[in-house]
């Protein structure tokens, strides 16, 4: 079984941020040695391969350290990090799905029913971004069983994956929604329904 991992495209950002924190004095070497393993410390001195895969738990520990030193340990730090990750993927121009954001079909529909149908197709395409940068979980878009005018993303087989990873994914969804410039903006919220089952759901109708 493959180990849960994140693509170097995003892993490199946390390495850069940690190194900047050390250079600025915001993070001490003692903190690094306390929080990170020897292998993780070695990564701070390596060139990260954008096409490579890196342990998701190492990523979580590194972002967790940044969260405590820069973000006050708040969940919002994870969310904001996910939003910045979306910008990074758009600016990088590597993933074609991100190029699609500015012209998604649902943003062109004024009729609520047509917009709802179009959003399903848009979400399936954008959801494929996550399989490009995260190698774990079964991600699927479905109509929210509690709200027939909304969607939710169901993520199964994710036992042991920390909540912070999904808070960041929620930030990515919210940033992509903002970039799409939909005529009726919606936001996304995260909830873990079971140890191996997470949902990211729309907070309001399309």
Image (cartoon, helix red, strand yellow):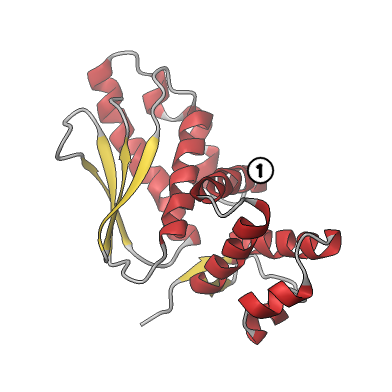
Q: Which residue corresponds to mark 1? A: 91
45 vs 77, left or right, is: right
Name above or below for residue 192 compared with residue 103. below
Residues 119 and 178: in front is 178
Residue 188 horizontal/vertical position (percent): 38, 38
196 vs 52, left or right, is: left
Residue 143 horizontal/vertical position (percent): 20, 39
116 vs 74, left or right, is: left
Which quadrant of the structure image shows residue 35? bottom right
Residues 114 and 2: in front is 2
- Residue drawn at point x = 84 percent, y = 58 percent: 24
Name above or below for residue 125 compared with residue 196. above
Name above or below for residue 176 compared with residue 73. above
- Residue drawn at point x = 15 percent, y = 37 percent: 146
Residues 190 and 48: in front is 190
Which quadrant of the structure image shows residue 204? top left
């Amino acid at each position: 079984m493959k180990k849960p991992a994140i693509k170097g495209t995003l892993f490199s950002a946390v390495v850069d941020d940690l190194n900047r924190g050390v250079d600025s004095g915001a993070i001490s070497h003692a903190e690094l040695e306390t929080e990170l393993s020897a292998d993780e410390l070695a990564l701070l001195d390596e060139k990260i391969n954008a096409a490579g895969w890196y342990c998701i738990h190492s990523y979580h520990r590194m972002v967790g350290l940044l969260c405590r030193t820069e973000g006050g340990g708040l969940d919002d730090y994870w969310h904001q990090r996910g939003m910045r990750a979306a910008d990074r993927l758009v600016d990088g121009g590597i993933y074609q799905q991100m190029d699609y954001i500015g012209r998604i079909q649902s943003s062109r529909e004024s009729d609520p029913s047509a917009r709802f149908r179009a959003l399903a197709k848009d979400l399936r395409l954008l959801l494929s971004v996550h399989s490009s940068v995260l190698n774990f979980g079964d991600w699927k878009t479905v109509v929210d069983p509690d709200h027939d005018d909304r969607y939710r993303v169901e993520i199964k087989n994710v036992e042991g994956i920390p909540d912070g990873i999904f808070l960041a994914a929620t930030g990515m969804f919210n940033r992509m929604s903002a970039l799409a410039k939909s005529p009726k903006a919606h936001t996304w919220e995260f909830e873990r329904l079971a140890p191996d089952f997470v949902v990211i759901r729309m907070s309001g109708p399309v």
